[in-house]
Image: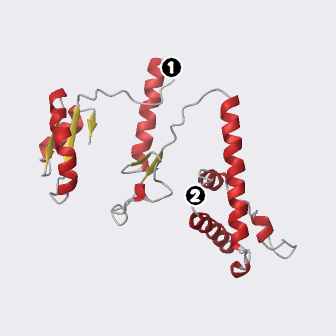
Amino acid sequence: MFKRILPPSDKKRKRIPRLSEVLLNCFSSLSPNCREEELEDLIYFILDLYTFHGIPVAIADVDMDQATVDLRSALEEHAALKSKQGKVGSPEADDSHMFLVLDRNVMGIPWESIPVLRGQSVSRIPSVAFLRDRVRLASAQKKRSGGVVDRVSLDLRKTFFVLNPSGDLKGTEGRFRPWLEQMRGVGWDGVIGRPPSEQQFLNALSQKDLVM
């Protein structure tokens, strides 16, 4: 689709670079039923990438209506092919997950609620090193058990929670407080409306299986 938009390559200019597999896999996860604005954003993003790599693109001359139609058709064909392959091959759990590593300047933005991520499984983690540590733990458990380990088993009775530690989310506290108070009956522990003490937090990290 983009080859039809980009100018033809010649001997004086280097060949048009190919999109990486990482980008293609990321873009192909976009739903064929997404909004026109999201398709346009994707098209502009890719055209900017080509421009950055020295390929002159007359963006003002691009027929954006036709480009969005072509891109949606490509996404529909890709989704249909994935669905067909999933039925023919061995059944696999659709448990794809996205991890966000955010610094303090952008962590306040509700990324999980933007349209392209809404409805997907998303988690925030402090660093890539943290994720590598979890993967290594799963690998170690796999070696000990001799089987396939793709998740860690938790004793959910060993849970510590912190609800509205800064005291400014009264609506959130009102919604979750009754349920969390009820969960104390099965062994949960935690604090509501205030931050935990340093010792409480250390005990939670060292003695509990899950900290929320």
Residue at 45% in and 53% down: 118
- The percent coordinates of residue 158 (x first, y second) are 23, 30
Q: Secondary structure at mark 2?
A: loop
- Residue 173 location in percent, x, y? 18, 50
The residue wearing badge 2 is 34
Q: Residue at x 58, y 30 (%)?
A: 92
Q: Quadrant of residue 152?
A: top left
Q: Determine whether 89 is above or below 127 in the image.
A: above
Query: In the rendered view, would you say 102 is above or below 7?
Result: above
Q: Secondary structure at mark 1?
A: loop
Q: Can you name the residue that lies furthest to the right here? A: 11
Residue 171: image location, x then y, percent = 20, 55
Quadrant of res 212: top left
Q: Is residue 147 visible?
A: yes
In 3D space, how far apart are the residues under numbered discs 1 and 2 (Cα atoms)? 39 Å
Which image quarter is the N terminus in?
bottom right
Indicate which label's residue lies in the foreground, 1 or 2.
Answer: 2
Question: With 156 as the anchor, is 36 left or right in this view?
Answer: right
Q: Is residue 96 left or right of residue 207?
A: right
Residue 15 visible, this angle: no
User: At label 1, which amino acid type do we have?
Assistant: Gly
Q: Name the residue rendered at 47%, 24% in the picture.
A: 142
Residue under label 1, please give it.
147
Q: Residues within 10 Å of mark 2 (few under 14, many from 20)?
A: few
Type of amino acid under label 2: Cys
